[in-house]
Every structure is written in structure tokens, then in C-alpha cells.
């Protein structure tokens, strides 16, 4: 199965499948298709060094709440830095991560110390495993993707705070890249304990992955250590200008949240029946993506045959008997795109 690239890598997909990069229907990411309409960037913004604008931090405080925070060029660079920073500031014992989830966390922690995994598909199983490990003082740091991409699992704020309390000289990292459609589930609704680190991405809900902007919320000690690594000018000026508008625009945010919630059943409906008939089952439902569980063989076949029709999906291998196939949102106003998907689904059933 081709998992050499992250979702959305159309050039890599073009090389593999021989289709021009501009002829794909890209459903391989969870990035909102309806991006925030970026305002025109003032001429001087292109020219000046991008010192952090106070207006950006004010906009972030308005959107995320009043917490100490650090802006960075996406949450990705912080995901890469956190393992070594948190191990230097806290426990050097085992980091616990979901076995299925955004793999960059695992990659980073694996490079600098022991890791163990909990079940990324089932909240109840994961809770049992983490509770057990906590009781045996086996958890150095705990990393939770909330909600998980691609499995959709979501832990309650109360559960997360309890684990943060139980950690012994360790940190709880919560990656909330996909939480913007359900803001009341965010830990940012609370006062943050000193050993909690929250990651937020401007890329997903705002559909602005290209500007590379993310925020980290943590104690001043953790933020200062991260800041040393990322240096000055880590967020470019145009990104700052666009994000100030997006984070301040409550009307757009509310409208978009409602629209995504309202459209979620239609987005699911498009795939659900045909995939269930092929033996898949629904494994995750989020307003920006849905994942179906199936055999690796079926996931591979579907990924391949969709790509042959110019539809890029995201397969995720779990083990030798199970894979997920994740479907991002379609722009429902694009009838040609919907038709392309329906033609593909029909071809699967006529081929059987
Ligand atoms: C769960 C999760 N966290 C973080 C990221 C990185 O996001 P960014 O660097 O664009 O903020 C991704 C990207 O796909 C993701 O899926």
C-alpha cells in the first residue's frame, strides 16, 4: 500500500499513478475544502521581517482563550521538538502514544527514547491500558490526539485532566488539530495544569494548511524551551496577516462550524452504503473526514482503483488484518466531483 507520503501530496500521487497534479479530486486530507477567504496582504507585509504581531496574539487569545502560547509554522515543527524538550524538562521514562494516529508524534518520540502504544481505535480499551500503566507508574509522558486522526476517538476533558494529575514528573501532550468543530471538547476551556501541552493547527478547520501556522499552549517554562529552538521569524508575515483576519472572524467561524455539522451526514451517505456492501465498516466520523475499516487487501484495491479514476484517498495500515481508508470532505457544490465519485463507486459494484 502506498503510504510513502502524507495525505495531499499530489505530486507524489502523480508520479505513482501517472495523472497530472491538477487533475485529482483530493480526498486524502482532513483539510476543510472551504478555506477561509484570505484577505489581500498589504505590500509592506511582504517586505518586512515577520516579527510577531501583537494583533496575532490578541486574535489567538480571542479564539483559543487566554493562555500562554507560542505561534509556530504549523504544529508539525513543535511535534518534532516536543519529545526532546519534554524529556529534558521532565521524566525520561516511556512515552505512551496511540498505535494508530498522526504518525509524526510516534516518529518523534521513538527517536529519543522508549515508547509504548495504547489502542488508538477504541476509547474504552485505551482508557484501560493507560489506567493500568499509570497505576504501575509506567507512563513517563502521555500523547493524545483528540479527536484522533484518522480514528476519530475523543477523550473527555475530565479524563485528560485526571491523567495529567497522575503523571509523575511527566507531560500530557494533547494534539487538538481537529477539535475546532467541537470547541467545548477542548482542554483550552480549562485552566491548564503546568504539565499539559496543547497543540492547535490553523490548517484544518480554517482550510489554511498552506500558510503553515499552529499554536502551542503550555507553561512558560515549556514555551521558553521551544522558543529557543524555533528562533525568531518562525511565522511568516502573510500568514500572520491572514490568520489575524481568520481568528477574529467569528461570523465565518460559526457559519462554517454549522455548515460542516449540517453537511456531515451527506458526506457520509455518499460512501457508506457502497462501502458497507463491500464488507467495510464505519470506524470514524468527523466533520472533516470519515474512515472505514476493512481488510488491507480491500483498502489497497479501493485506494488503487479510486486513484485510477483520479480520486485520491488515504489508506492507513493498522495490522495484517485491518486497514482504514479515510475520506476527506467533497465540496458538495461541485457536481462533477460528486459524479466522479459516484461513477467510481458504481464501477466497483458492476465489476464484482
Ligand atoms: C493530528 C494532526 N496533528 C498535527 C498535524 C500537523 O498540522 P500542521 O503542521 O499543518 O499544523 C496534522 C497534519 O495532518 C495532524 O493530522
Image (tube, grey):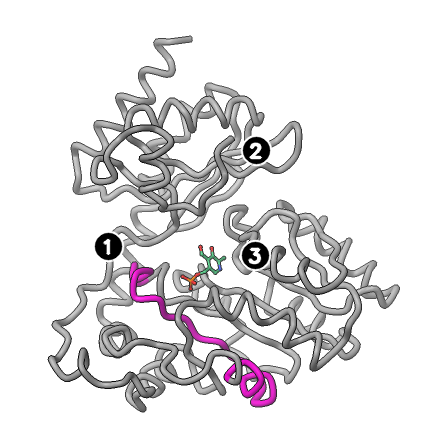
Q: Identify the element where label 2 is drawn.
A: strand
- Which quarter of the image is occupied by the C terminus? top left
Task: Determine whether 201 is above or below 220 in the image.
Answer: above
**Residue 323: which numbered mark, if any?**
2
For marks 3 and 2, the one nearer the N-term is 3
Q: Residue at x 39, y 36 (%)?
A: 313
Q: Judge depth for marks 3 and 1 and give the one in front.
A: 1
Q: Is residue 147 magenta?
A: no
> Residue 115's image quarter?
bottom right
Q: Which mark is residue 154?
A: 3
- The image's mark for residue 34 is 1
Which mark is in front, 3 or 2?
2
For marks 1 and 2, give the one nearer the viewer: 2
**Along the horizontal axis of the image, is 237 left or right of 28?**
left
Residue occupying the point 42% across, 75% down = 72
User: Quick one: label 1, few (<14), some, or many (20+) residues within 10 Å?
Assistant: some
| Distance between mark 1 and mark 2 Cα atoms | 28 Å
The residue at the point 51 percent across, 30 percent down is 1
Image coords of residue 11 (percent x, y): 32, 42
In the drawing, does residue 123 fall left or right of residue 3? right
Magenta range: 206-227
Is residue 219 highlighted in magenta?
yes
- Ligand 1 occupies quarter: bottom left
- Residue 243, position as x, y percentages in the image: 28, 74
| Secondary structure of the residue carrying numbered label 1 | loop
Q: Badges 1 and 2: C-beta atoms under 8 Å apart? A: no
Mark 3 lies on a secondary structure that is: loop
Label 3 to label 2, Cα distance in Å? 20 Å
The reply to whether dot 3 and dot 1 touch (C-beta < 8 Å) is: no
Q: Sequence order check: which comes first, mark 3 or mark 1?
A: 1
Amino acid at each position: 500500500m502506498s503510504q510513502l507520503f502524507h495525505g495531499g501530496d499530489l505530486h507524489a500521487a502523480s508520479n505513482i499513478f501517472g495523472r497530472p497534479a491538477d487533475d485529482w479530486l483530493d480526498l486524502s486530507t482532513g483539510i476543510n475544502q472551504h478555506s477561509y477567504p484570505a484577505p489581500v496582504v498589504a505590500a509592506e507585509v511582504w517586505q518586512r521581517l515577520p516579527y510577531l504581531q501583537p494583533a496575532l496574539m490578541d486574535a489567538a487569545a480571542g479564539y483559543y482563550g487566554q493562555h500562554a502560547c507560542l505561534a509556530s509554522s504549523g504544529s508539525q515543527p513543535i511535534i518534532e521538538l516536543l519529545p526532546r524538550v519534554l524529556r529534558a524538562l521532565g521524566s525520561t521514562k516511556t512515552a505512551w502514544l496511540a498505535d494508530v494516529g498522526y504518525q509524526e508524534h510516534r516518529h518523534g518520540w521513538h527517536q529519543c527514547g522508549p515508547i509504548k502504544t495504547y489502542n488508538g481505535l477504541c476509547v474504552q480499551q485505551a482508557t484501560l491500558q493507560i489506567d493500568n500503566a499509570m497505576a504501575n507508574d509506567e507512563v513517563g509522558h502521555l500523547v493524545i490526539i483528540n479527536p484522533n486522526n484518522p480514528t476519530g476517538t475523543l477523550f473527555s476533558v475530565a479524563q485528560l485532566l485526571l491523567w495529567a494529575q497522575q503523571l509523575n514528573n511527566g507531560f500530557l501532550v494533547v494534539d487538538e488539530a481537529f477539535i475546532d468543530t467541537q470547541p467545548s471538547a477542548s482542554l483550552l476551556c480549562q485552566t491548564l495544569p503546568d504539565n499539559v501541552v496543547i497543540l492547535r493547527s490553523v490548517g484544518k478547520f480554517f482550510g489554511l494548511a498552506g500558510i503553515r501556522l499552529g499554536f502551542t499552549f503550555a507553561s512558560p517554562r515549556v514555551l521558553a524551551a521551544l522558543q529557543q529552538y524555533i528562533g525568531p521569524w518562525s511565522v511568516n508575515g502573510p500568514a500572520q496577516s491572514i490568520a489575524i483576519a481568520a481568528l477574529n472572524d467569528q461570523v465565518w467561524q460559526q457559519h462554517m462550524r454549522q455548515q460542516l455539522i449540517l453537511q456531515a451526514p451527506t458526506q457520509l451517505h455518499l460512501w457508506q452504503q457502497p462501502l458497507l456492501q463491500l464488507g467495510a465498516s464505519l470506524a470514524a466520523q468527523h466533520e472533516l473526514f470519515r474512515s472505514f475499516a476493512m481488510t488491507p487487501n480491500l483498502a489497497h484495491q479501493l485506494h488503487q482503483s479510486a486513484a485510477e479514476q483520479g480520486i485520491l484517498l488515504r489508506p492507513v495500515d493498522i495490522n495484517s488484518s485491518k486497514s482504514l481508508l479515510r475520506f476527506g470532505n467533497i465540496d458538495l457544490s461541485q457536481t462533477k466531483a460528486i459524479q466522479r465519485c459516484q461513477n467510481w463507486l458504481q464501477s466497483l459494484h458492476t465489476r464484482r
